[in-house]
Amino acid sequence: MNLTLKIWRQKNANSKGAFVTYNLEGASQEMSFLEMLDYLNSTLIGKGEEPIAFEHDCREGICGSCSLYINGRAHGQDSKSATCELRMSRYKDGDTIVIEPWRSKAFPVIKDLIVDRSAFEKILEAGGFISANTGAAPEANSIPVPREHADKSFDAASCIGCGACVSACKNASAQLFIASKVSQLALLPQGRVEAKLRARNMIAKADELGFGSCTNTGACEIECPKGISLAHIARLNREFLKATL
Amino acid sequence: MNKLNTKIPDGPLAEKWTIHKNRIRLVNAANKTKLDIIVVGTGLAGASAASSLAELGYNVKAFCFQDSPRRAHSVAAQGGINAAKNYKNDGDSIDRLFYDIMKGGDFRAREAFVRRSAEVSNFVIDQLTAAGVPFAREYSGYLDNRSFGGVQVSRTFYAKGATGQQCLLGAYSGLIRQMSLGKVTLYSRRDMLDVVLIDGKARGIITRNLVSGEIERHSAHAVVLATGGYGTIYYLSTLAVGSNASAAWAAYKKGAFFSNPSFVQIHPTSLPQLNDYQAKLTLMSESLRNDGRIWVPKKKGDKRHPNEIPEEERDYYLERMYPAYGNLAPRDISSRAAKERCDAGYGVGKTGLSVYLDFKDSIAKKGKKVIESKYGNLFELYEKITGDNPYVEPMRIYPAGHYTMGGLWVDYNLMTSIDGLYSIGESNFSDHGANRLGAGSLMQCACDGYFVLPVTIGDYLADDIKTGKIPTDHAAFEEAEKNVNDKLTRLISVNGKQTVTSFHKRLGKIMWDYCGMVRNEEGLKKGLKLLEELKEEFWKDVKVPGTMDELNQELEKAVKVADFFELGRLMCQDALNRKESCGAHFREESQTPNGEAQRIDKEYSYISTWEFTGEEKDHKLHKEPLEFECVKPKERTY
Ligand SMILES: Cc1cc2nc3c(=O)[nH]c(=O)nc-3n(C[C@H](O)[C@H](O)[C@H](O)COP(=O)(O)OP(=O)(O)OC[C@H]3O[C@@H](n4cnc5c(N)ncnc54)[C@H](O)[C@@H]3O)c2cc1C
């Protein structure tokens, strides 16, 4: 099939970017979205042009590297799906596809479609862990965890740190990202000890880094490739309240 | 020269690790703060090592090529992590886990290493649980287990189909904590391109900053490689696209020995290749074989929809051929059986290169809900990619390159043959012999990183407490940096016509065809010739656009592919040398009357360890005899 692609090109962090239009012939519905970009790049290289830089690694929706805004949607139109899981069978001959990097001040563009997400790491550094040194752990079965809690904790922990939530939020809030970590650990007895402090410190850090506040629009939940629920934000808020009481 | 001293302590097998720990030298807490350690790689091995070393007081510099440590390829492991907890009371023990790994590896691993990992495995589960890994639980609140291929007990801990992600995030959170305390400095988006030796000791690395393109020097008192596996040499594999051999290869060319390079595990349950554009193959976890039955039609070229093929016309070939283990036969055996059926004309799908993995019976017996709770995310993944719903029709699967048992040679301290250069996790060759059992890699990575290396590295660093900072203006850094610059310049200046990826695809095909699931002398020789020709073509006609001093993904790929050409040659040579079959290494010339791998213990009961002797020169083989105190190598029947 033939496609019209409008892709954000930007040489580096310091230069100004712009959309460039490419007419791609010979793409196939059997390709994944990223394979379509691979194919575009091979044609660009063939023509002596510079290929488009985009991030990817595992290509099965778990590493969180890929990060594209596709026709105005984070990770494209499919729900619970990362860009690398998006298939070209979702498009048809003659379609126009607009591809942008994450749009958020907290994630500056490095080149073309690649952004800097290291702000997430800084938020985690503020408390996204249990302070358990190697060697100090008790026998694993000495801490029973109700299965329901373990399952919920897993759901929260399935965050892949891609940044779609921030990018989809009109306030550029990192609340869902923070909530996933706070909730995962707060649901486990091992993580309860530091739960309140964790919530407070991570939120304070996000504020400091310029992430916006949460106004419960729910856009993050819709765009999250792992379907992480807003209920975790409610838990985060409860932990935060406890910490400030 | 005795570079191949394994340093395995004397004493009974079960006591060796304790004896060793009690005997080796330590560095006291105050002195640790004077010592710097570079850890390249932030997967389960690297992240657990970096955080544990930092907790001890060492100053750690951690490197990865992704934008964040959390994206290391360990994140993609699905099925589980083994430990000998015996929570199921089904007869498991450290000794049984040890034996299963030895047998699974077809008796080509060192006993002392495997015994140690089996022993340490239980602490790993404790540690990861304490770090907040949400492992699956039973209704009692205690940890659940499942079984994996090649074993008869239930010892695999899991977190749905995302065990690797959860274990890695557990280790990563420890790393993050040490970053927040200033004990770990993270260097992400860096490719390590060389290791720097001063007076024969590893004292630093050369990296390329993947954003600015800058070539950087980093020094330390010791360097740890935790850079993962090189299964991407086949181009299509279950590994992340960026996985590579370049760090290990740079070490090899500086004098670190490489063992069993041709031992590559081909995983039986990957999605088949769907088209020519495909950049990778997606794994369907082996855990699916607990509830899925593998079959092909009894009739050649049967084109009916699988649901229309009646029960009596299906050949559940694993159950037929390996009644004791059935669908849970080990990976190498299951993979070859699938290839054999497909080559004989019974394969299904458009290309005839796939077999069915069917959940019909389990769904009927246990209910859809139970199956969904166990494998929901894998079923979703499958449907997303293929458009087929595995709840109503069988999956189609085919073997794919998956795990490299081969890797850098290490001694009992996990040190390579270069002083002060260590290798942990999949990047070394230590535990898995000629075939790795499922859920054994995460286990080994975490054992190495959390519990072995942090203890053993002190034995070496004890000599360095007075050394002081290692300066990066030493001539050795100068020279290494120059070599790196030359290599990159050379790649860019070829300025040919063909893309790096097109070469990688062709290279991968050669490796798959001649050094893949089945090998023979003629094929390997042909593979070597084809590799040589393609390598020449690469250096004449590859096109690497852009420049060195910018973010340049084609240049990154080019480095990796250039190294794969050299490693590919070593793999073929290694496979040629080993005329026996063992584990995943199947030499057609050496099979039992029923077509199983035939080991030849009298001649090949050794580890093949290779030494680099110079560009374009032959690699030199050292044979390290395998001695078995506790297990008796026997034919591997399942
Ligand atoms: C799809 C899949 C599923 C699997 N499932 C299981 C399972 O269920 N159970 C199990 O036990 N095992 C499983 N395995 C195997 C297991 O996941 C890996 O062997 C293991 O995670 C490897 O971990 P590692 O820490 O050694 O390396 P990795 O996790 O691969 O990490 C490598 C690190 O090195 C860095 N790196 C590499 N090269 C360079 C370089 N040149 N410069 C700088 N940095 C570099 C990377 O950035 C990364 O941080 C699976 C493997 C695959 C592919």
Image (cartoon, coloured by chain):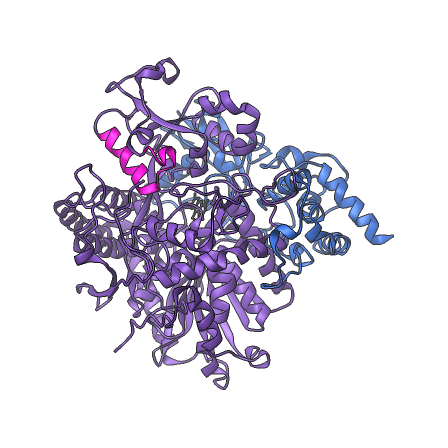
Quadrant location, the C terminus of chain B: top left
Q: Residue furthest right?
A: A245
Chain (blue): A
- Residue B102 locus on image (x, y percent): 35, 53
- Residue A128 locus on image (x, y percent): 66, 54
Chain (purple): B
Quadrant location, the N terminus of chain B: bottom left
| Residue B123 in view of the camera | yes
Q: Residue at x 72, y 54 (%)?
A: A202
Q: Magenta span has B633?
A: no
In this rendered view, identify the residue nearer to me: B153 or B302.
B153
Q: Residue at x 65, y 50 (%)?
A: A106
Predominant SS along the magenta part: helix
Q: Magenta span has B325?
A: yes
- The stretch in magenta equals B323-343
Rendered image quadrant of residue B116:
bottom left
- Residue B245 locus on image (x, y percent): 35, 56
In the image, B544: left or right of A152? left
Q: Residue furthest bottom?
A: B466
Rendered image quadrant of residue B213:
bottom left
In this rendered view, identify the residue nearer to me: B53 or A173.
B53
- Residue B359 locus on image (x, y percent): 45, 25
